[in-house]
């Protein structure tokens, strides 16, 4: 699937290309017939007095700015993903608000403005970057799309709500989300210089990136900055202000400070140490944190806040009321999301452990067990625990988002069922497994540790082409199936068509419907 039939420009690797933006000239380079511009500042360095504050405008520069190397990423502690992929951590710095652009041609001969896709990375709001090699935008650009990836502030720098310490810091719990908005504003003002159409922007992301995409549907300042959205494994996750207040007090104690001024004066390394201490304490006793907050992902100390300032107090209600009317949506999850996290957490203790787990999230334990028995006949207790946590953290929030938006736009839903052969098959269809398929990178040997060496290239082409065709005209097509069927609008009719991506991709009507109906009522 291509957005244009024009031939790619004939440039050799390493040839330079220059574009002019609102802040100055950028010098990128051609790589494999695609022009790449890296490390572009879209906001001022969020340092000093700007730490914990909304992003400020970037300053212009004189002459040509080198855009051939990626910029520093947001400060973060070492991540399990770095260890999993066997790579070195990317250099970080508080001056991290950079984005990257891949384009088939900044000045297409046919004069056509190309569709734009903006990727928001995942990582639990505490790790990751837009410059990770697994998010290479080359294949999107080869298919005629202008692809953008971005960094945003992570951890305490992006999501520490300080309003309970100083009311003047209202909105500080969502400055990482505002970084994403600032990047989208940069796209609006500059992407035409790269051959992109600012009136045809699709945002997409996975995990925390998907949660960000979902929340951007509710952020007033983001309205009009994007026109379609894809949410991969993440719904409308935002903590309530009272939980943010408790988390902030816990973090200040770990950092050994009492005031915002003291916090701003701390070296960033001290912030990371406090973050690590907080995370370690929560992972040591996740049950206590879940009981306190009612959230199975409360071990994540830093997430967006439903503060009523940046994010509405009721994000799902805002979407249901039409906060993103007209924004078509693809939303979905993987069959066995929790298997990735099960490798890092202790197993439950038999049926009693499963009942205890269910009691944390529902008063109708017997009803839940009946629903899971119907959807997962013959499953082991461990499998049921994985299904439960997959549902509560990922699938049900995704389904609720789909239902809320279906009243106001065209919504399509998927489930990714293909099981990885890596690690002796332990990962299965786990969290993040679909990313190499979306980016059509299953042949990249660096990713084989996640998906194995024999992932089906045809499935990767089908998923990638569906994402591209959605960005091109909003009518995604799937090889062998034709146009992707949409969910019916609420009360418009029966049926819930879900595309199930696997070695044999097909459409199923409301797969695992008993548990979906149990959780959504």
Image: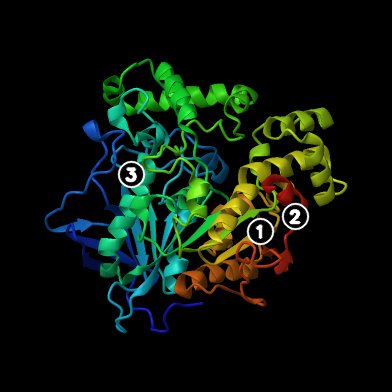
Residue 415 marker: 1
The residue singled out by tag 2 in the image is 513
The residue singled out by tag 3 in the image is 72
Q: In the image, which is nearer the foreground, mark 2 or mark 3?
A: 2
Rounded to the nearest whole Å, what is the CA distance between mark 1 and mark 3? 34 Å
Q: Quadrant of residue 76?
A: top left
Q: Earlier in the sequence, mark 1 or mark 2?
A: 1
Which sits in the foreground, 19 or 364? 364
Q: Secondary structure at mark 2?
A: helix
Q: Residue at x 36, y 40 (%)?
A: 309
Residue 263 marker: none
Rounded to the nearest whole Å, what is the CA distance between mark 1 and mark 2? 13 Å
Which sits in the foreground, 220 or 483? 220
Q: Residue at x 31, y 60 (%)?
A: 187
Tell me if residue 34 comes above or below residue 175 in the rendering. below
Q: Quadrant of residue 245?
A: top left
Rounded to the nearest whole Å, what is the CA distance between mark 2 and mark 3? 44 Å
Q: State the scheme by which the image is colored.
A: rainbow
Q: In the image, which is nearer the foreground, mark 1 or mark 2?
A: 2
Q: Position of residue 450 (x, y in %)?
A: 61, 50
């Amino acid at each position: 699937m291509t957005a244009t039939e024009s031939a790619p420009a004939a440039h050799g690797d390493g040839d330079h290309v220059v574009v002019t933006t609102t802040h100055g000239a950028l010098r990128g380079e051609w790589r494999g017939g695609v022009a790449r511009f890296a490390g572009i500042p879209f906001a001022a360095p969020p340092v000093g007095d700007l730490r914990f504050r909304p992003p400020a405008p970037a300053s212009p520069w004189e002459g040509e700015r080198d855009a051939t190397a990626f910029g520093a990423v947001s400060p973060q502690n070492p991540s399990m993903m770095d260890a999993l992929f066997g790579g070195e951590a990317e250099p970080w710095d508080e001056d991290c608000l950079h984005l990257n652009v891949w384009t088939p041609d900044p000045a297409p001969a046919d004069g056509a403005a190309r569709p734009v896709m903006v990727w928001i990375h995942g990582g639990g709001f505490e790790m990751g970057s837009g410059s990770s090699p697994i998010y290479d935008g080359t294949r999107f650009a080869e298919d005629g799309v202008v692809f953008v990836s971005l960094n945003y502030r992570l951890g305490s720098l992006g999501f520490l709500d300080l309003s309970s310490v100083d009311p003047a810091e209202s909105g500080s719990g969502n400055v990482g989300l505002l970084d994403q908005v600032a990047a989208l504003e940069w796209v609006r003002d500059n992407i035409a210089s790269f051959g992109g159409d600012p009136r045809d922007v699709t945002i997409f992301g996975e995990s925390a990136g998907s949660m960000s995409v979902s929340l951007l549907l509710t952020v007033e300042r983001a309205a009009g900055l994007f026109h379609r959205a894809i949410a991969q494994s993440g719904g409308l996750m935002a903590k309530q202000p009272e939980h943010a207040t408790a988390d902030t007090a816990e973090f200040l104690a770990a950092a050994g400070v009492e005031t915002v001024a003291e916090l701003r004066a701390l070296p960033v390394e001290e912030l990371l140490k406090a973050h690590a201490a907080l995370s370690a304490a929560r992972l040591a006793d996740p049950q206590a944190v879940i009981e306190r907050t009612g959230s199975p992902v409360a071990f994540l100390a830093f997430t967006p806040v439903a503060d009523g300032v940046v994010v509405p107090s009721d994000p799902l209600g805002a979407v249901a009321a039409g906060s993103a009317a007209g924004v078509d949506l693809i939303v979905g999850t993987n069959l066995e999301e929790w298997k990735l996290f099960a490798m890092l957490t202790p197993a439950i203790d038999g049926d009693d452990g499963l009942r205890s787990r269910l009691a944390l999230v529902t008063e109708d334990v017997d009803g839940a067990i009946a629903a899971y028995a119907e959807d997962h006949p013959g499953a082991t207790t461990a499998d049921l625990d994985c299904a439960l946590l997959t549902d509560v953290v990922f699938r049900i929030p995704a389904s609720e988002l789909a239902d809320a938006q279906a009243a106001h736009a065209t919504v399509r839903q998927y489930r990714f069922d293909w099981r990885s052969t890596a690690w002796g098959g332990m990962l299965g269809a786990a969290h993040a497994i679909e990313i190499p398929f979306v980016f059509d990178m299953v042949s990249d040997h660096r990713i084989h540790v996640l998906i194995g060496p024999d992932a089906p290239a045809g499935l990767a082409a089908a998923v990638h082409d569906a994402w591209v065709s959605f960005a091109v005209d909003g009518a995604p097509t799937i090889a062998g199936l034709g146009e992707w069927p949409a969910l019916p609008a609420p009360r418009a009719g029966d049926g819930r068509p879900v595309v199930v991506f696997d070695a044999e991709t097909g459409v199923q009507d409301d797969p695992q419907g008993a548990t979906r109906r149990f959780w959504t009522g």
